[in-house]
Amino acid sequence: MYLRTVLLLKKTNISKERNLKHWIYLKIILNTFLVQVIFSMRNPIKITMVGNNGEKYSFLIKFGEDLRQDQRIQQLHKVINDALSNNAYCCDRKLSVLTYIVFPISTKLGMIEWINNTVTLKDLICESFPGGKESGIKQLQSKVVEHYRWLSEKSISSNKMVVYAEATINNNSMVTVAKFKQLVQSIPDDILRKSLLNLCYCAETYICLRSKFITSFSVLSICHWLLGIGDRHLDNTIVSTKTGFCIGIDFNFAFHTATSIQVIPELIPFRMSPHIVSLMTPLNLTGFIRETMVHTLKTLVDNRDMLLSVMQVFINDPSADWAKMAKTETLRIDSDFNSKEIQWFPKKKILSGKDKMNGINPIEILCRELENSCIPNDYKKALLNILKSDSQNSTYKRSKLQKFNITHNQQIDCLLDIATDHQILCLAYSGLQLWV
């Protein structure tokens, strides 16, 4: 197949910090190229091309999504990196978010830069199962089935929202926590540790890899919480097999749309499953994770004006997905819909990011988003009660936290408490596989 010469912007050097300052024009001049279908929900295509400098360049072609949102999230990540690099603590520890190029071609088509030497968190973990990757995938899938079967015990309906609603309403916290612990114990508690060890040649390399995994995952978690990014299943985080650096992908659910729009609302601020916590033994949540999160949040709050100014683009030019969500929300309240008057929706979404940087209790923000959801009132009430109650598996009392003007340390403690609450994790969508 003949490929017409095209012109691309390409980075000339990619350091560990992904230097984005040096660019050149690059021509793709090959008459053949490699195409590979990636089997997932939308079956994107990986295309590998050769430039006039003899190097190969890979991109992911995605259909059916407006990638302008992913592009803007990457722009926000670059601003976050600038803020982190200007903070002495964060700069000394090389805290950053790895960014990549996103090319929106239309509202339904786009290209994403392929990052080499990376695997999804799911593949990384499954490789360490006894029996190998295929066995690991089958075991994880069997747990998804087991989890959903347990949720279905309290319902005779085949409707997923009804199943989750009745499980949330009818199962008390002790029963729910016991089931979650059973699911967790069915997976070796050192599975993630073994996964990282398999990438290393010696103990010293493992210590460095683990440290980079922990710090990058912590920074990524705070950035995702600040931007309200949801749907953090095991395939939406990729890990560098060379450095252990964690990278977030697929930002279709941003600014709490996974909480307010989904029929099974997400309550977790970020992924912090028991096996990720186990990787930090013996310090667990009191060591690297918490310290990195506190300093990252403080740095971003100090640069709130810069971040909010970049977020303004979501209001000025809403994505196709947000326009659709605004229409759905408006029609639910008022049948007289004007497609030109949708700015209220992005403004409301951006407000959550502003409130987080102004020290509002994370539970208050989550409850507000949940109140705006379209789920049945009894399901909504049950979720709100769980959020406002204290966790069964923690001594932290999030119900005692004041609503406004809380410190960075209090925000992080509250977020970690929600993210590790076994009752919340067990009642979340089973496809997230939060027991791993």
Image: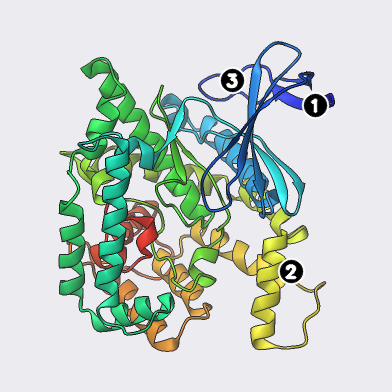
Query: What separation in Å lies between label 1 and label 3 (alpha carbons)?
Result: 26 Å
Residue 277 percent location from the top left of the image: 25, 45
Whether residue 112 is situated above or below residue 384 in the rendered picture? above
Q: The residue under label 2 is which amino acid type?
A: Gln
Determine which residue is flagged by label 1.
Answer: 3
Disc ID at residue 73: none
The answer to whether the residue labelled 1 contacts the one labelled 3, judged by CB atoms less than 8 Å apart, is no
Label 3 crowding class (10 Å Cα cut-off): few <14, some 14-19, many 20+? few
Q: As rendered, which of 292 and 179 lies closer to the eye?
A: 179
Determine which residue is flagged by label 3.
Answer: 14
Q: Earlier in the sequence, mark 1 or mark 3?
A: 1
Whether residue 278 is situated above or below residue 380 in the rendered picture? above
Residue 180 percent location from the top left of the image: 21, 62
Determine which residue is flagged by label 2.
Answer: 343
Residue reaching furthest front? 1
Judge from the rendering whether residue 110 lies leftward or rightward of residue 302; answer left or right: right
The answer to whether the residue labelled 2 contacts the one labelled 1, judged by CB atoms less than 8 Å apart, is no
**Closer mark to the observer between disc 1 and disc 3:** 1
Q: Quadrant of residue 319?
A: bottom right
Residue 334 percent location from the top left of the image: 70, 88
Q: The residue under label 1 is which amino acid type?
A: Leu
